[in-house]
Image (cartoon, helix red, strand yellow):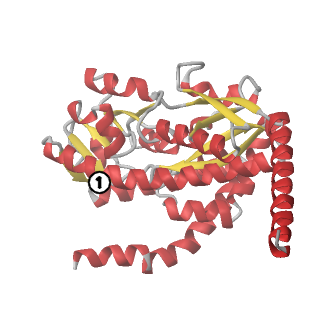
Amino acid sequence: MKRRDFLAGIGTSAALTACTTGTEQQASTATSERVTWRMVTTWPPNFPGQGTGVNTLVRYINELSGGRMTIEVYGAGELIPAFEVFDAVSGGAVEMGHGAAYYWRGKTEATQFFASIPFGMNIHEINAWLYYGGGLELWREVYEPFNLYPIPAGNTGVQMGGWFNRPIDSIEDLRGLKMRIPGVGGEVLRRAGGTPVNLPISEIFTALQTGSIDATEWVGPYNDLALGLHTAAQYYYYPGWQEPGPALECMINLDAWNTLPEDLKAIVTVSCQAMSLDMVSEFMARNANALEQIRASGTDIRAFPDEVLAELKRISNEVIEELAAADPLVERVWTSYRDFQAQARGWQLISEQAILNTTNL
């Protein structure tokens, strides 16, 4: 055997030995660190967008962890009702949950700023606030007393204003209106003379079709078409003043989170970010297609009159300022949110909004 062949053989043997040893160590580590969790959600099983987004999230976690971490998903009603997700995760009945933070305003009014508030930040702005403006730190501070660790996990983008069975030509047309609308938006409607109702997804279509509610907001064309709302109401209004950029959340029981090794924590965090990008992209694509289908169905798609939006904005500011005045924690969150939005809006006006305006030239 020539010398160079002999040396090459030694090098190859050593490399194979090192790889084998490393693989055995990884296998040993993987075996000793296998984690199986359960996740409950506020969405029906496999619901387009949000429910399928959760499926994507757990698949990312499983694949990136090499099978070391597996999560079994339960849609709303399969294990617990939709609006009991917060308590189930907080109390440790399950390790994870997925939903929208404004559903938990009964715990503290501060939660809803981490989902969406009327005339608040859009998707770009709220992501910037959460990751680079101190919003995520505040969110975790708000959730810590409930033994929860939140991670942003999805966003539907700006929503539609809702489905109505009568035209909204003035603010007076909201008086006596019974509408499914959660969070601060619901309180705004109440002060405008309407009656807000908070319903889970599974009950929205039937309530609208039977007339037990007069109107509903849900998300946008993609989800609304899937629910068949275009067959239950005549008018479809925009823009979604009540939810301009609703962030979704993955909430984790804090005790369970603290048991994870650092690499699995990183995998969960990165998977949530990847799922968020995927969801935003899906909603942009699906909404555009679904809107054309809704338009073709004969639905009357209308913009809210400016004077209606102006009055809703005035009431929204009034409601939020009252919430902040009544609770120091809400005041801290609102101050951070408001200041960041004001700073970001200056850039948005000459960037995103300006370029969109050019499409009408």
Question: Where on the picture, by quarter, is residue 342?
Answer: bottom right
Q: Is residue 54 above or below residue 311?
A: above
Which quadrant would the N terminus be assigned to in this image?
bottom right
Residue for point 42% across, 73% down: 352
Q: Residue drawn 14% across and 41% down?
A: 297
Nearest the viewer among 78 and 107 is 78
Is residue 239 among the parts visible in the rendering?
Answer: yes
Q: Residues within 10 Å of mark 1 (few under 14, many from 20)?
A: few
Q: Is residue 310 left or right of residue 10?
A: left
Amino acid type, mark 1:
Ala
- Judge left or right: residue 10 versus residue 94: right
Q: Is residue 158 visible to us here?
A: no
Residue 77, above or below 128: above
Which residue position holds label 1? Answer: 288
Q: Work out whether 193 lies above or below 12.
A: above
Residue 306 % position (x, y)? 30, 60
Q: x%, y% of residue 151?
A: 67, 48
- Image position of 197 (left or right of 343): left
Residue at the spot x=82%, y=37% of the render? 33
Question: Which residue is more in the foreground, 265 or 350?
Answer: 265
Q: Quadrant of residue 158?
A: bottom left
Count of numbered marks: 1
Q: Nearer the viewer, residue 168 or 220?
A: 220
For numbered disc 1, what is the local secondary structure? helix
Q: Using the rendered view, name the quadrant where residue 340 is placed.
A: bottom right
Which residue is nearer to you in this view: 149 or 184?
149
Name the outermost residue toward the front: 1
Q: Residue at x 23, y 75 (%)?
A: 360
Task: Tell me residue 196's x, y (percent).
Answer: 43, 33
Q: Identify the image quadrant of the C terminus.
A: bottom left
